[in-house]
């Protein structure tokens, strides 16, 4: 493969044109990122093992030999069994009553269907079955969005997968390195979804120094332009991990109401909140995050109890597009995305600007 101004150890290692990872829950976006020279990563943590198998087979059939991956969230201390009744029996009444109050206050239909977070309990049982689906797939890359269980890293490497671990602090990077991760994604405070306390510019060089060249580092969190990509290289990263830029692309098929929020959002319109999953997650501010942050209202429960508490309600909010409560995980880089473009146009703009800055 011909080298490019943006070629690094990462692009060579994986056989991709550019060391630009595109994380998304949409199959079409994964495919388009790959076809545009990047590395698409499918967010599969809320999918059943059967759905993971189907999604990865479809991606593989459409991208051929191009590298692509899948991301799972594997936090510690989850229950052993996928038993919703057991979790529900432990939910405090004050929290149940508050959820009932939100249904009434915002006229959310009770359609008795689960949401993405309540279709199953995040548990050791589900994680093992999801991993099994990943191991049997053609995905070359296995990414772990939260947690780096050594036994899972070992299994993935035995199956020839390249293992990525997303970390928000140096201590997490040390654990991931010890467990055998092949790449470390240093994800700063600016990032969408589950993110830590340290800003990207402070975190990336610390992780680069810590790994001391043993494995490549990717920068994540607020990476939203070609200039950011070039800055990541200057900090010692050998690639970038991007999630927020794809939310406003044509292929993402975001609902019109949510798309309007995203296109008009500034960096100040995002907030880190535990109101979706029980773990801190950066999202677009809405009445949803405000209600859970209001003095006197219950505080979010720990994962996976919070998932089961609010999952059906979140599902109904999304299905019925209940505007005040609609929100989306997104990073502070959302400020740079105020028009709908295709994934290919977005990638081309990143590559052109980053190459020009790197060469300058």
Image (tube, helix red, strand yellow):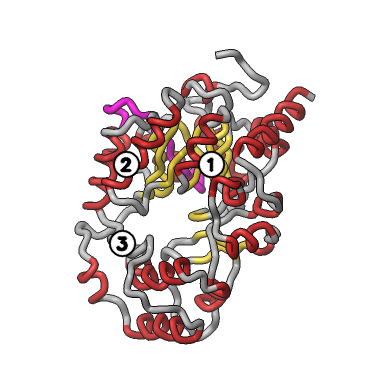
Q: Which residue does the numbered mark 2 point to in the structure image?
A: 54
At horizontal 64% and vertical 63% (from top left) the residue drawn is: 261
Up-down: is 109 above or below 146?
A: below
**Callout in the foreground (3, 2):** 2
Q: Which residues lie in the magenta part?
A: 156-171
Q: Which residue does the numbered mark 3 point to in the structure image?
A: 119
Q: Position of residue 154 (x, y in %)?
A: 29, 33
Whether 176 is among the magenta residues is no
What whole-number distance in Å separates the C-alpha atoms at marks 3 and 2? Answer: 18 Å
Up-down: is 24 above or below 67?
A: below
Question: Which element type, helix, strand or loop, lies under badge 1?
Answer: strand
For the C terminus, give its image quadrant: top right
> Are circles 3 and 2 on residues that touch, CB within 8 Å?
no
**Residue 292 visible in the current orientation:** yes
For the N terminus, give its image quadrant: top right
Horizontal relation, residue 342 to residue 155: left or right: right
Q: Which numbered tag is attached to residue 311?
A: none
Horizontal relation, residue 136 to residue 23: left or right: left
At horizontal 33% and vertical 67% (from top left) the residue drawn is: 114
List the single residue furthest toward the right.
Answer: 360
Residue density around tag 1, few if under 14, some if 14–19, many if 20 or more, within 10 Å: many
Q: Which residue does the numbered mark 1 point to in the structure image?
A: 186
């Amino acid at each position: 493969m011909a080298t490019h101004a943006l070629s690094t150890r990462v692009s060579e290692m994986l056989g991709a044109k550019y060391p630009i990872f595109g994380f998304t829950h949409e199959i079409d976006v994964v495919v388009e990122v790959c076809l545009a020279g990047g590395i698409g990563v499918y967010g599969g943590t809320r999918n059943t093992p059967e759905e993971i198998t189907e999604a990865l087979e479809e991606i593989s059939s459409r991208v051929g030999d191009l590298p692509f991956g899948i991301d799972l969230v594997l936090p510690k201390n989850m229950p052993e069994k996928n038993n919703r009744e057991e979790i529900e029996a432990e939910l405090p009444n004050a929290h149940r009553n508050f959820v009932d109050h939100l249904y009434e206050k915002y006229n959310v239909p009770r359609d008795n269907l689960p949401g993405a977070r309540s279709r199953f309990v995040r548990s050791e049982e589900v994680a093992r079955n999801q991993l099994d689906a990943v191991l049997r797939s053609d995905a070359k890359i296995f990414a772990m969005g939260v947690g780096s269980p050594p036994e899972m890293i070992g299994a993935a490497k035995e199956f020839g997968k390249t293992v990525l671990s997303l970390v928000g602090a140096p201590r997490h990077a040390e654990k991931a390195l010890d467990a055998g991760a092949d790449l470390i994604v240093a994800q700063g405070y600016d990032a969408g979804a589950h993110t830590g306390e340290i800003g990207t510019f402070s975190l990336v060089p610390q992780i680069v120094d810590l790994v001391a060249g043993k494995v490549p580092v990717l920068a994540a969190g607020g990476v939203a332009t070609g200039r950011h990509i070039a800055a990541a290289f200057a900090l010692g990263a050998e690639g970038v991990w991007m999630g927020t830029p794809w939310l406003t692309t044509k292929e993402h098929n975001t609902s019109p109401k949510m798309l309007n929020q995203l296109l008009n959002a500034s960096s100040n319109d995002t907030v880190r909140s535990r109101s979706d999953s029980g773990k801190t997650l950066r999202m677009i501010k809405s009445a949803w995050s405000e209600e859970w942050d209001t003095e006197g209202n219950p505080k979010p429960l720990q994962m996976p109890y919070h998932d089961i508490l609010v999952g059906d309600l979140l599902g109904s909010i999304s299905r019925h597009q209940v505007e005040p409560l609609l929100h989306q995980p997104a990073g502070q880089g959302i400020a740079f995305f105020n028009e709908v473009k295709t994934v290919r146009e977005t990638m081309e703009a990143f590559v052109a600007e980053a190459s020009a800055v790197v060469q300058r």
